[in-house]
């Protein structure tokens, strides 16, 4: 079983059991130990590989312990501090890690609540743990791009030098992605000023600022829609597709106002770009059988639905994208759903005939 599959298995366990985990100890037993043993491959019952309740000889508070120390080559390489499942991880949870990092040979520190894993090293100053992680991984919402880096910390493929060489790039790419994501949702004045200066030669007055603030938001959304169109064209071998306009990709129930309000305000429903892109793929497939305007989208807490005539009694497909393992749901003539695991959106095309056949059940 590859590391991706082991992470997917752990993600299912977290989603099933997470609500019943109320203590730090339960978090360690249910989620962290399986991560160390099943995902990273270390024997949690072998003290030469994993030391629970690790204590350093000097430089720490009396009686203070780290939850786990992972050994490699007879030296401590990774320190792990655990918090209760559901706790938000931040620096106030990391004081013990800071102290232990400074007095051991460990170059990697890990702060976790069983689902979120924050990896730290000493990029900013030697032997002093950085205040910001170089890698942030969430098991139940896995970024597949991070799996190769995680593999370098596993027992059989441990490569500390490679991890440290990549750490700085990973750290700053992660932070840049978060900054860009925030700017796409709600651009600040300096971002608007910068983009305005690239296309407008006049002074950045209050009136210009107000005008371009709206234009920047629209440009962001159209840019994302254009990227969706590009991927659709590539997947269809260059065949023309119905363009995804700002109005199309952000139509009800994924309205412009919905994208700007918080997840809580939207009753826990958060529509992702990946779901919109997958919807456009399904729509492109079935538009050979029905008018494109008849294919509608409807997002829910548990799945993203693709409907004919915006009618719940006419399901075409369901996109189950809320876990690390994505599924495409298809329907037979009796409306029984079959879930198909997919690793990429391109795999939706493998079910094109089924999707086309489904729309004929309702006409």
Image: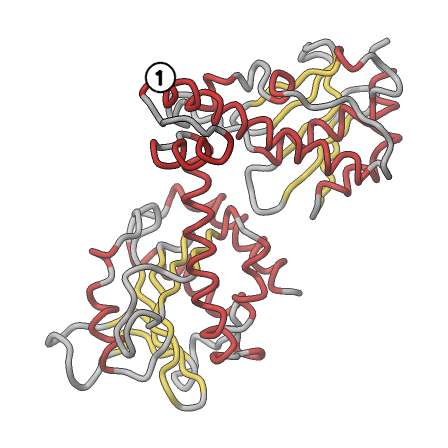
Above-or-below relation of 292 to 274 = above
Q: Quadrant of the C terminus?
A: top right
Image x and y of residue 195, in percent? 46, 34
Image x and y of residue 291, in percent? 82, 12
Above-or-below relation of 349 to 44 = above
Q: Local crowd at mark 1 within 10 Å, few (<14), some, or many (≥20)?
A: few
Q: Is residue 96 left or right of residue 159?
A: left
Picture quadrant where residue 130 is located:
bottom left
Image x and y of residue 295, in percent? 74, 16
Closer to us: 282 or 357: 282
Closer to us: 245 or 255: 245
Picture quadrant where residue 338 is located:
top right
Q: Write down the residue under mark 1.
A: 207
The residue lying at 57 percent from left, 47 percent from top is: 324
The residue lying at 75 percent from left, 11 percent from top is: 293
Image x and y of residue 11, in percent? 52, 50
Picture quadrant where residue 354 is located:
top right
Q: Is residue 222 left or right of residue 291?
A: left
């Amino acid at each position: 079983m590859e590391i991706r599959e082991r992470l997917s298995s752990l993600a299912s366990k977290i989603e099933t059991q997470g609500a019943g985990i109320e203590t730090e100890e339960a978090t360690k037993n249910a989620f962290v130990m399986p991560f160390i043993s099943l995902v990273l491959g270390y024997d949690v019952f072998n003290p030469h590989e994993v030391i629970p309740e690790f204590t350093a000889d000097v430089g720490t508070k009396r009686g203070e312990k780290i939850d786990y120390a992972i050994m490699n080559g007879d030296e401590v390489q990774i320190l792990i501090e655990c918090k209760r499942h559901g706790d938000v991880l931040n620096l106030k949870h990391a004081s013990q890690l800071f102290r232990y990092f400074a007095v051991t040979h460990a170059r990697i520190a890990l702060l976790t609540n069983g689902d979120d894993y924050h990896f730290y090293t000493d990029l900013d100053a030697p032997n002093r743990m950085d205040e910001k992680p170089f890698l942030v991984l969430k098991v139940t919402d896995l970024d597949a791009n991070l799996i190769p880096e995680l593999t370098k910390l596993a027992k059989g493929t441990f490569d500390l030098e490679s991890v440290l060489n990549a750490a700085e790039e990973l750290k700053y790419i992660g932070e840049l992605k978060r900054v860009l994501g925030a700017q796409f949702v709600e651009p600040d004045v300096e971002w608007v000023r910068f983009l305005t200066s690239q296309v407008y030669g006049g002074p950045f007055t209050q009136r210009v600022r107000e005008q371009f603030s709206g234009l920047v938001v629209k440009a962001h959304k159209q840019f994302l829609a254009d990227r969706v169109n590009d991927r659709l064209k590539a997947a269809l071998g260059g065949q023309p597709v119905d363009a995804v306009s700002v109005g199309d990709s952000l139509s009800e129930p994924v309205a412009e106002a919905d994208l700007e309000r918080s997840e809580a305000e939207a009753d826990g429903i958060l529509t992702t770009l990946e779901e919109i892109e997958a919807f456009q793929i399904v729509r492109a497939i079935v538009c050979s059988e029905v008018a494109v305007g008849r294919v509608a989208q409807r997002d829910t807490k548990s799945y993203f639905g693709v409907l004919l005539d915006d009618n719940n009694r006419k399901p075409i497909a369901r996109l189950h994208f809320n876990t690390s393992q994505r599924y495409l749901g298809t329907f037979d003539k009796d409306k029984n759903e079959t879930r198909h695991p997919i690793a990429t959106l391109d795999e939706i095309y493998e079910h094109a005939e089924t999707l086309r056949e489904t729309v004929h059940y309702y006409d």
